[in-house]
Amino acid sequence: MDNERAMNTEDTSLVLPSDKNSHKGQQRVLEQVKTIKRSKSKMAKSASLSPTSPASATEFSEPKFQFSPGKLNGTSFKSSVSSMTASQRATLRSLSLRSTVRRQTQRESQKSWNMKSQSNGMVGGRNNQTSTERSSTVHYNHTSIQSLISASRSQSINIKPSSSQSQTVNKITLARSKSEGSGANGATGDMPDITLEEAVKYLKLSDESYQLCGASFIQHQTFTEESAKEEVWRLSGVPYLIGLLKSDNLHVQQTAASALRNAVFKCENNKEEVEKCDGLEVILTLLRNSSVAETQKQLTGLLWNLSSSEKLKPGLIIHALPQLTESIVVPYNVWTDSNTDKDIDPEVFYNTTGCLRNLSCASDNERISMRNRTGLIDSLITYVQTQVDKGEPDDKSVENCVCILHNLSYQLEKEAPDQFKEFSVPGASTTENKNKKSILTPKRTKTQKVSFSAMEVENPKGVNWLYHEKSLELYLSLLRFGQKEAVLEACCGALQNLTASKSPVSTLMSQTIIEKLHGLPVISPLLISANLGLQKAAMSLVGNMSRVASLRGTMAKEVLPNVSSVVSNVTPKMVEMDRSIATACRVMHTLMLAEPDIGKTMLNTKLIDSLSVLSSNMFFETARKDAGILLWSLWEERIFHNVLKKQGMTKDTFVNAVTATAYKAVKEKKGH
């Protein structure tokens, strides 16, 4: 069979942000807490690695966390009685008895509400690196806060939502989350008994204590209650929170940012509301002017959450990309005289690369903008290489960086043609098999002698890094030593993209990976990974490389056993792997017919039975056709007859109505 037909696979890949794999409610919150309890991974000493850890989500979305505001002006957050108006002090006195009774009742019916800062990270994330997290907590003085609440209720405050938003207000009952523990030093506090409507009203008041109380309540509610996010949107809370980012009070800024960060998580309405009220400009201005690490963490985390919105990506590319690159990504990795005073927290870099990771899967124009951003690609490569050199290939920011590089390698030849102008094919020697017996026999296609000096320049820069030999070697190092499956999948995806086309450029990439960098020993084990996304990426990469005729001998020895194992163990429950299994059948077809002596050793009853069942299973829309073609061609090639007959197999298993239909479809396609 023509190798072009054999390798009609999903040639390229792109990591997309998605909320599909995110859980809801308490389960999601518990998963976030688990990400804090990380065990430090060790580098694999063996060059042959087969990850078998639980499935990982390659699709990346938004980090979610809980942030608790710290002290206000050096004291626990409470309203000073001396600063109250006369009416407020009177209200406080009148409520003293009721507050005492309420506190006693609350102590009997409900434990104290605990606020604890959670680590920033991917929902359902899988981080293997030990991390020390800092909790910022607040002890709410119940009596003083209730006095603020009561005083506020006695005033006439009417904040009207926009006409497009519902005025329905639901009081959300607060229960202690199972995932919430005590804060630092065991600090706890009582949750004020207010509604979201009242919390939003507090945001508009000039008193910073009210502002902080309202923002804190919103931050907590939107962390624990999904419905609270839409409620905040209906109450027009987002514009007020954006307004608080302009406050001169550090803790008001941080609490407003954290409330926004939770409010926009998986809530498109709130994300769009940020854009409508010009919130992006406010966020970036504060980020640019603030030197406080905690503020930077909340703002970059907010940008990360916003970046999963397709509608916001163009604006983020134009306005946020330059600032994030120049003020965070480059200074964090490149030491120059101009940024020696930069002290960027690792969490800020992590959040920033998470944001850029989402942006990198936007349209081709956005990808081009990112590729052309001075210093971005260089800094990402520098960070990844540094972590590998330090023996920390599973660092959480490495995952973000490699996923960005993966996405920027997507359709690289098409979107960055100027990079390949110097590529030349000085000569080619024809080694086509003129004695082929079947339309299905792989051709011995032309072996091209190619030259591309840009792959080997000593000091690559910018886009040159995306296809440089050093980058290919870096990806293979991560595959060899890394254990984090999302990183492994991104590395396979980047290599898959670089080998995707049928051009001489992809041929050279494949030859470099296999012949010069000896990458097959680390790629082959991934073909039988328990992680379906990783297995699919590895299988597609192998499928791309098997197009190159000169590599098939080496590939047959290295990958056929694992590819055969995949095909031999197909079950009806594996329908979601249809395309990956189809690719496996095509790889087997190409390599077995190209190297029949090795192919003979793969033949056994289990493999043939699996192919036979697969070829007639209508649920496998793609794989059944490729299984039928492989069966037909195995019998048509007489070199396999003796092996098959010795195992008691007959022609009917290979040549029948099902396989004939598949063969006819291929023949007709090649006739056009």
Image (cartoon, helix red, strand yellow):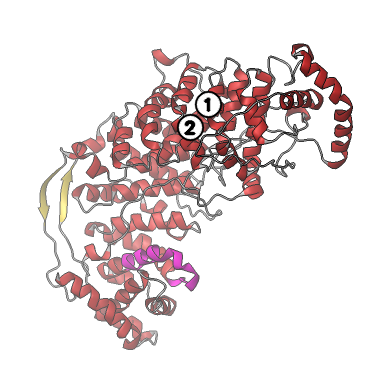
Q: Which residue is mark 2?
A: 274
Dot 2 lies on which element? helix
Q: Residue at x 20, y 40 (%)?
A: 417
User: What kind of secondary structure does the magenta stretch mostly adopt?
Assistant: helix
In the image, taking residue 193 as reference, residue 277 lies left or right, namely left
Where in the figure is residue 532, as x and y percent of width and height?
47, 58
Q: Do callouts 2 and 1 mark residues in contact (Cβ within 8 Å)?
A: yes
Q: What amino acid is at disc 2?
A: Val
Whether 95 is among the magenta residues is no
Based on the displayed image, in which of its 4 quarters is residue 41 positioned? top right
In the image, taking residue 223 as reference, residue 657 lies left or right, namely left
Residue 485 vertical placement versus 385 (above, below):
below
Alpha carbon distance from label 2 to label 1 = 8 Å
Based on the displayed image, in which of its 4 quarters is residue 122 positioned? top right
Dot 1 lies on which element? helix
Residue 98 vertical placement versus 532 (above, below):
above
Query: If the image is split into quadrants, where does the C terminus sit?
Result: bottom left
Q: Can residue 119 be spotted in the picture?
A: yes
Q: Earlier in the sequence, mark 2 or mark 1?
A: 1
Where in the figure is residue 19, as x and y percent of width and height?
50, 48
Q: What amino acid is at disc 1?
A: Ile
Where in the figure is residue 103, as x and y percent of width and height?
86, 32
In the image, taking residue 208 as reference, residue 481 lies left or right, namely left
Where in the figure is residue 626, as x and y percent of width and height?
32, 71
Numbered badge on residue 242: 1
Q: Which residues are magenta?
A: 568-588
Numbered badge on residue 71: none
User: Looking at the image, which is closer to me, 96 or 594?
Assistant: 96
